[in-house]
Every structure is written in C-alpha cells, then in structure tokens.
Image: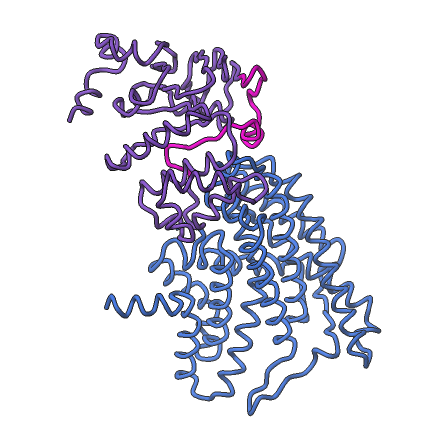
Chain colours: A blue, B purple
Amino acid sequence: MTGLSELISRAGGVFLLPVAMALVAFILIGAPSSWLTLTVAGLSMGMMIFLMASGLSLVFGLMDVLNFGHSAFISFGAFVAASVLAALGGWLGADSVLLNLLALICALAAALAFGLAGGWFFERVIVKPVYSDHLRQILITMGALIVAEQIILASWGGSPLNVPRPAFLEGSLLIGDASVDLYRLFAFALGALVYVGLHLLLNRTRIGLLIRAGVENREMVEALGFKVDRLFIGVFMVGSALAALGGAMWAGYETLITPSLGAELMVVVFIVVIIGGLGSIQGTLLGAIMVGLADNYVGFLAPKLALASTMILMMLILLWRPSGLAPAVK
Amino acid sequence: MTLLSLQNMQTKIEQYSVLHDVTLDVPEGGVFVLLGRNGAGKTTTLRSIMGLWKPNPGSVRFRGEDITGLHPSDIAKHGIAFVPENMGIFGGLTVAENMVLATANGKFDQTRLERIYDLFPALKKFWDKQAGTLSGGQKQMLAVSRAIIEPRELILIDEPTKGLAPAIVNAMAEAFREISEHTTILLVEQNFEFARSLGRDMAVIDDGRVVHRGTMTDFVADKALQDRLLSLSMFEEEAK
C-alpha cells in the first residue's frame, strides 16, 4: 500500500487526478468521439476558470484578503471586450485572419488594461482600508460588487448582450468523428500560455520568489527588508487583469452575456480556489481543470446532476484534503 | 558605545498592554542577553524593535537615529536582522531560495557564503532541498545564516535553542561566538546555561519592565538575585 502511494506520488500525485477522471469518463461514456469533444470542452472551460481564479488565489494567499469583488472584474472584462469586438465588427467578419486576430487582441488587451487600472483603484480605495479585518473585507467587497453590477447595468443596459466571435475561431475541427470547437481550443491555448507565464514569473524571478515567500510568511518577508504592500498592489492588479481576461474569453465562449455574469461565476471561482489550495497557482490550475472536466462529463452522463457536480467535487476533495489539493502553505 | 537605545518603550497588543516601561541600552559588540520568565515581554521587546509591533509611547534609537514606528523593511535596511522564535523559515522554498531572499540584490558574497558553510556544513548539503523538510536544528541554522548572509550591525535572536538537541545547541553557541566577533547580538533566551556562556552584558525583563541591568559575570555570581528575578524552577530545569 505504501509502495503504491509512493509510486503515485512520484508519478505526479494529486496532479494525476484529472487523468484519472478522464479515464473513468472514457469508460463510462463509451464513445471515443463524444469523450474527446467533452474532454476538450472541459479543458478549455477549466483554463478560462483558471484565468479568473488564479489572481484571487494569490491575493487570498498573499494578503489574506477575501475579495468578493473579484467577480466584478470578470463582468467588466466581458463587457469591455464585447464592446471592443462590436466596435471592430468589420475586422471580425473580414476574410483576413490577421484582421480577425487584431480585433481579438484589441478586445483582450482592452479587458486586461481595464483590469489593471481597475485593480489598482479597487486595492487602493476599497481593500486597503480593511486589511486584516475579514468581516469588513467581505462586506465592503460584496458592496463593491453590487456597485460594479449597477455600473454595468447603467452603461450597457440590462438586456443580454451578444458577443461576436472572430471569423477564424468560428466552426469546429474534426478529429475522426469528434468535433472540437476552435474557440475552445484557442481558450485552452491562451490559458496554458498564461499558466506557463505565471509559472515562470513565480519560479524564475526574484519578484516571484517574494510572492511565494509572502504567501507563506508575510511578516518575515518584511523583516528581511521588503515592502509586501507594494508587491501586493502588483499582484492585485495582475490578478484583476487576469480575471478580466478570463471574463473576456468567457464572453466569447457564451456569446450572450448579462451583468450578473461575474456573480454567477464567482461561486465556481471560489470553489476552484478552495479545491486547489490557497495561494497556489498549480493548485488553482488543477482545481479549474477538474471542475471543467466534471461539469462536462457529468452534464453528459447525468444531466440532472450537472449543477451539483462542482459542489459534490468540492465536498469530496475537502473531506479528503481539508486544505485543498496543492496549497502553497502545507 | 551604545548601539541600540530603548527609552520608556510601551507596547500594546490589541487591548493588552504587554510592555509597560522598557528602557535599555545595548552596547556595540558581543552578545547582550535578555532574560526573563515566560510572558515577561522579551519577544515583544524584540518585535517592537523590529517594527513588527509599534511601541507607543517610547522610542527606539539605533546609532542615535530614531527608528520608532518605521516599517520593518526600513528597519532591516538599517542593518538589523531578526531571527524569530518560530525561525520564520519559508518551508515551501528551497534552502538556496531562503538564503537568496535575505540578500540585498539576489547575489551571494562568496566569502560570506563560505563562512556560513564552515559554521553550518549541513546547509551546503541540503542547499537545494525544500526548507520545510529540514530538521528543527537545520531550520535554526538556516534562520541564523539568513541573518548573516549580508553585513549586519545587530541581530535580534529569539530563543534559538528552543527544542534543539544538546549537540545542536553547542554548535549554535560556537556559531554565535564567532558571529558576535563582527556583529552585535541581542539574544532572548530561556536556556540560562547557553545564555551565560555567551553573554557579556545582560538585562532581565519582568512584567513588561526592565528590572535589572548589568554584566553577566555579576549576575551569575549573585544566586539570590537570580532566584528573585528568574525563579529557581528555571535553574532546576537546567540542572536536569
């Protein structure tokens, strides 16, 4: 038994869980083409959730701040990107892939820029006065979320907004009998790229080292001569920008968005952060992928359980590992 | 010459007043030992010097400069290092990464690093290991090494022998002796044997006040004073 546990641990440990889920689903689903379509859908959904959740996990881990307003950046990212895409409708529908891509890059860049600026404002004005007071953090960030939703309502109206997709990402790729949505493949690739970037930032740079150390023991980092507050502003801004980027990608995925988009996704984002373990980027990725896969597999196998699948997954994982699958501080 | 001067320092933690009146001059060079019973305010004194808790009222002067209430990072930049009671090791980081964090620009002074390897050979062996997997003694070695990887003028060390095996305690005493040849150490310690083997000057804190100051030689010679200020039980425990 110990030998098996060591072997699993050496092969990747908890990071093998998505592989195990995929294998079990393969047996249960039976049809390889359906399994492949669902797996790609689950992975791309997971990557988009990862974009939204990674910042929240770092902010929570580094500064012990419960930011319920995080989802406002998801909503704003979606609406800002949708507006830019609508304004660049000519480029989106053009035959040129380059113009399509430019329109998409402009939309994502606008969402990122909004997230960075909004993150700075949110941290300085709303979060900073309530450091080390969880109750006030919850109240004020929930309040900020309501205000943000109202701003979106006032700016974009209450009707669902159509989000056009770039022409080059419309349609599907056929692999055998399986149909794989191009937009989902792009979402997966973008999420993977962001993960690699974050991984390199955290593990290969001095700022990353400070962030990892700050997540473990903020006070000691300060006693070593560093101002964690400044670091936190940066992390908060990047986290908010990633949430906005995730929101922008989600908007293209759903193609119809409402002002309550962020609030609806927030539950899933919190579940991913809890499942993965606070302050850990690897944990957040793992949690997001598992949630994405579970949602798609259960939705296919037992549609009535689809809504509850994420909650059930969280309950099972927390019963097994109360601190999450791969927390930054063990 | 006085390196660190605490004047009428009072510190509150939430609504509790822990330090009532700490006035103390720490001379430059050697090991200055701060003794006292559990809960007397020794750790609070170190944390207040380091800026982790803000004394109010009262002042902390370092080389004559008022550093009261400065951010801990600014205090660290004055050349003051802190080794907390829990060692403050980043368990998820490697030994090397823990050490890099303590350098000013991310680069090691090779001479200093070699000196650390000589003091604590275990660190070289476990250089790329996760610090969280080290033993208690090795973690303490890492915590002390982190404090001396850059030139410091004062090192605040809180109960470094707590929970360590006697052999490690002896190694630690040797290391402190060597470090104190170049750097002043303000040592909080419950292990009286360890403290008296190192200390040149000393003070006793009781109920948040400095109740005695003097040389370690005089204090060791005065058993009645030891009994009155530190209680017998401490020495009985040490004797065992």
Q: Report x, y in % for residue B102.
A: 51, 39
Q: List x then y, in percent, for residue B135.
A: 31, 45
Q: Residue at x 64, y 70 (%)?
A: A254
Give me the residue at 72% from left, 74% from top. A165
Where does the C terminus of chain B fall, quadrant-wise? top left
* Residue A264 location (% of width, % of height): 57, 60
Residue A118 horizontal/vertical position (percent): 69, 48
Q: From the viewer's side, name the closer residue of A172 and B116.
A: B116
Query: Is B125 colored magenta in this rendering?
Result: no
Q: Nearer the viewer, residue A82 or B184?
A: B184
- A313 vs B220, left or right, is right
User: What span is colored magenta in the figure?
Assistant: B61-88
Residue drawn at x 68%, y 63% is A248
In the displayed image of the protein, which residue is found farthest to the left? B240
**Residue placed most toward the observer, B73 or A254:** B73
Q: Is B92 placed above or below A157 here?
A: above
Residue A165 vs residue B223, the one in the foreground: B223
Q: Is residue A79 left or right of residue A16?
A: right
Residue B74 magenta-drawn?
Answer: yes
Q: How many marks?
A: 0
Residue B95, compared with residue A247, is above or below; it is above
Indicate whether B154 appears above or below A103. Answer: above
Q: Which residue is painted at 51% across and 88% down in the image?
A: A33
Q: Is residue A16 above or below residue B152?
A: below
